Amino acid sequence: MSDGPRTGATIQTPAPAGDGDGGHPLAVEVRGLVKRFGEVEAVRGIDLDVRAGETFGFLGPNGAGKSTTISMLCTLVEPDGGTARVGGHDVVAERNDVRRNIGLVFQEPTLDAYLTAEQNLRFHAELYGVPKALVPARMQLVLEMVGLWERRKSLVSTYSGGMKRRLEIARGLLHAPRVLFLDEPTVGLDPQTRASIWSYIETLKGQEDITIFLTTHYMDEAEHCDRIAIIDQGEVIALDTPEALKASVGKDRVQLQVDDDAAAIEALRDRFGLEATIAEGHVTFAVAGGEEFVPRLFAELGVPIRGVSVARPSLDDVFMSYTGTTIRDAEAGRQDPMLAMMRGRR
Amino acid sequence: MATTSTTPAAAGSTATAPAPVRVVVPPGGWRADLRGIKVVWQRELIRFWRDRLRIVTSLVQPLIFLFVLGGGLSHLAAGGTEGVDLRTFMYPGVLAMAVLFTAMFSAASVVWDREYGFLREMLVAPVRRGSIVLGKCFGGATVAAAQGLLVMALAPLVGVPYVPIMILQVLALQLLLAFMITAFGVMCAVRITQMQAFMALMQMLVMPLLFLSGALFPLAGLPRWLEVLNRLDPLTYAVNPIRTAVFDQIDLTPAARAALLPGITWFGWNVPIGVQVLVVAAFALVMLSVAIWEFRRA
């Protein structure tokens, strides 16, 4: 086990997430990263550490600066300020070393549809200099991992959207990168395919010793991550495990089924000092220790209750507690990322 | 080169998981760049071979020029060709033309690659950008020369015999010409993101370059302005050597040779064929360098 930068792409360090204090090299190290597009500051001084072996999620609405940050980490865009090291290499000074050590799966497809799956992979293997003797075994491994081995001779143009995404993931892994970047790996896919992509990612974590850095704007997907950074308007506003983030909200979500919604809301305000709203058709409010609160509610509300549900906070609630808006509303308000940035600034 | 090893499954993998294949990607260098050039070149060939329709359709235009235009005008031109069939005269020009269109089409693949995202896969690879451009240009040259060979097979139809030395000379010249055109096309394609725009630009540039080069008319007795433009057109220096290689193999009266193949002069100096080929090579190198330079910044 060595901590220093390595020239090869071997993954010798089985570094399970969680015990990465001190001993393990950082897979990604970001300090004060800044990117401007003209007057607009898309990324405003981000600091991040991703430990080797971790699955790290970058969560935020579209236009928050996720893709710009990931582009800088992948050496596609040069930062205007700050530094970033990926796999121990500087993204500006050691660009090719970074590139050899990372796998990329972009939001948009980057496959050659007129080649077969096998030809696409072979192209990648040659371009990344995978030793010739290892190519066949490596190709079989990654294609079997994503369940496309039988279809390897088919033209990519005959693949479905989900199959293409799986092939891209396989290709990203072909040269055994130390860090796999997945930019919105499931965007545009139906729920069933999304679930299957996630099960492939889980399998992959078991088989390859790899750090996964992904972006998503789906709250439920962020739960798959060991740690999450919430990014909004070019800044990291929270960074922790999903559990810790949810705990930091500290309040449970309580929903009531009552006959008279207005009376219930008024009673909640008068007797408990709680602000409730109607969400998903029910009177909804947040309160610490929701389960202990329910008996008091029945005893003191004074409005007949037909049903009650208590939910632990979700990442949606986390996002809301940090930004004062839901991720969906944040996106609706900023169709154009550039405009959004400008609004955010002024 | 790299050291490689296969190790048992890492801690954390399940017992049923296949043993991971460990890969050490070697640090870059000229070997990595060579592999990059080769695989980009191979992809061009695979895609050309897949697209049989394109092979057939890009034959149509040269055939129309040769047999329809050449055949149609041959009676009209008979007075000025010293007894040589106009189609025989036009044939070397059409050999250059076939290469021209195919090479342009190859360069257009850069625009397609951008549109379909594949360009990104190449741009993030740990190889020098130059090797991607070189691979593209070699690919375009190979594909165009293959197309040129098909047109060369028509030689007997226009009274030109199959002579091995001629075929080799023409093939070499076609390769060089195609390389130059692909480099030129890639140079333009780096800046252009839309296929329509690229095609329009190529139409605007290719036809004048082709006509000015003397592919379809002899360089003797041109008006002054046309002569100047002809000498500035890089294609001129590829068409004339091709025509020389072909005409060396057919019987021509001295008068016919003087009328149809007067050679190229610069301010009265008769430019040797070797220098003409060097001009094409120099153009090719300049365009390649610009294309690589632009690709680096892309």
Image (tube, rainbow, N blue to C red):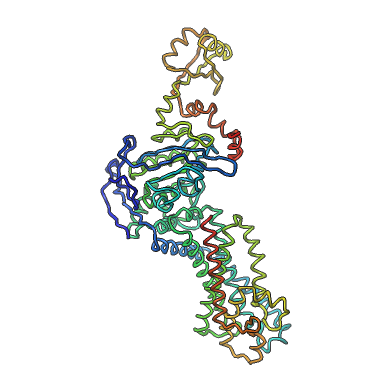
Q: Among all residues in the image, which is located at the extreme front? A: A81
What is the quadrant of residue B24 in the picture? bottom left
Along the viewing direction, whichever of A334 and B291 lies nearer the viewer: B291
Relative placement, left or right, of A333 versus A108 is right
Residue B55, percent across and down?
55, 68
In this view, B254 is above or below A86: below
In this view, B195 is above or below A254: below
Relative placement, left or right, of A176 versus B222 is left
What is the quadrant of residue B98 in the picture? bottom right
Residue placed at 45% from the left, 47% from the top? A74
Residue placed at 50% from the left, 64% from the top? B136
Residue A256, percent across and down?
51, 16
Residue A322, percent across and down?
50, 27
In this view, A338 is above or below A267: below
Quadrant location of the N terminus of chain B in the rendered image: bottom left
Residue A36, percent across and down?
55, 43
Q: Count the numbered circles shown.
A: 0
Residue A200 at least partly seen: no
What is the quadrant of residue A242 in the picture? top left
Residue A48 at least partly seen: yes
In this view, A43 is above or below B90: above
Along the viewing direction, whichever of B87 and A176 lies nearer the viewer: A176
